[in-house]
């Protein structure tokens, strides 16, 4: 018996299909993010296998991966389907991000250098200029993750990457509110200014408010949309838009209430 296996009988064991299943999962995830696969749409294993010309095994693995990431749901006797958009999930994702990213930023600030700050500044500027939702999501994630990278906490960064992926579909909703994207970009600028000053408490406060504000905006939008009758999405957006409060106004209201 091969000593390299420590006595475990691997002969005849199937090789892992990670590359194929990952490719399928990535393709399905992109289709969900781009709206080609709508919430609650069925993800039929046989149809997916035919589309990619593969067996059922990597498709099952891909669907399990998507389910673990929150993109899909798998029900006994019903199969897999695209996960629905949830106001509660959106708010919770941003609440968790607020806590973890505040921690990461506090750890990162003392380790930032002129080079890392130049890179983060360029990423913030790129996100501000971006008008394509797909590219904006990527640039926004790059800005945040590079802001925290000097913390040197790989497990924390892995958690944040997972949360960013879970929140992609929700972040895209902000493109229904152009004025809020502008506010978000301005908040990025303020956070970055505090980081450059080495002002840890202010930077942590700003990033927490930034994320909680985004979560609350998306929560309100989805809650109000769910209460509307079946009308075109453009009408839903217009109806929900005026009632969504900005993160700054919420912050002022909270300050007034506590004073």
Image: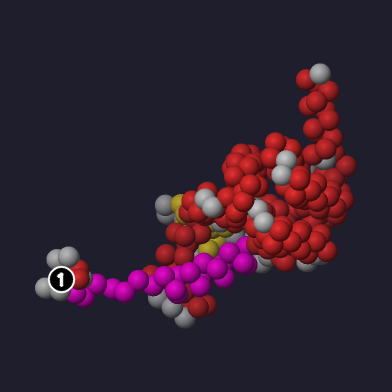
Which image quadrant for residue 30? bottom right
Q: How dense is the environment of label 1, judged by Cα within 10 Å: few (below 14), some, or many (20 and up)?
A: few
Which image quadrant for residue 201? top right
Which residue is at the front of the view, 88 or 74?
88
Residue matched to label 1: 3
Q: Is residue 246 left or right of residue 71?
A: right
When the figure is inspected, residue 34 is found, relative to residue 157, above or below; the finding is below
SS type, badge 1: helix
Q: Residue furthest top?
A: 259
The picture places residue 91, in percent across and down from the top left corner, at: 66, 41
Residue 216 in sight from this viewpoint: no
Instruction: Give the extent of the magenta segment.
Output: 11-32
- The residue depicted at 85 percent of the width and 45 percent of the height is 241
Which residue is at the front of the view, 182 or 76?
182
- The residue depicted at 11 percent of the width and 73 percent of the height is 1
Q: Residue furthest bottom?
A: 53
Q: Is residue 53 left or right of residue 188?
A: left
When the figure is inspected, residue 205 is found, relative to residue 162, above or below; the finding is above
Residue 110 in sight from this viewpoint: yes
């Amino acid at each position: 018996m091969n000593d390299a296996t420590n006595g475990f009988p691997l002969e005849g064991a199937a090789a892992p299909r990670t590359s194929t299943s990952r490719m399928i999962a990535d393709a399905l995830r992109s289709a969900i993010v781009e709206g080609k696969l709508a919430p609650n749409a069925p993800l039929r294993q046989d149809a997916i296998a035919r589309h990619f010309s593969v067996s059922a095994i990597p498709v099952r693995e891909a669907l399990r991966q998507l389910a673990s990431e929150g993109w899909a749901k798998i029900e006994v006797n019903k199969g897999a389907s695209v996960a629905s958009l949830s106001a509660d999930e959106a708010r919770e994702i941003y609440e968790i991000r607020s806590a973890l990213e505040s921690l990461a930023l506090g750890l990162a600030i003392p380790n930032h250098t002129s080079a890392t700050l130049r890179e983060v500044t360029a990423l913030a500027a790129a996100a501000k200029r971006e008008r394509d939702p797909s590219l904006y999501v990527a640039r926004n994630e790059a800005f945040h993750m590079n802001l925290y990278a000097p913390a040197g906490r790989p497990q924390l960064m892995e958690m944040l990457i997972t949360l960013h992926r879970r929140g992609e579909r929700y972040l895209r909703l902000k493109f229904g509110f152009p004025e809020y994207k502008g506010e978000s970009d301005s908040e990025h600028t303020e956070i970055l200014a505090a980081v450059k000053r080495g002002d840890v408490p202010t930077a942590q406060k700003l990033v927490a408010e930034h994320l909680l504000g985004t979560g609350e905006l998306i929560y309100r939008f989805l809650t109000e949309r769910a209460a509307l009758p079946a009308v075109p999405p453009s009408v839903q957006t217009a109806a929900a838009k005026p009632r969504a409060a900005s993160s700054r106004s919420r912050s002022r209201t909270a300050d007034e209430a506590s004073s």
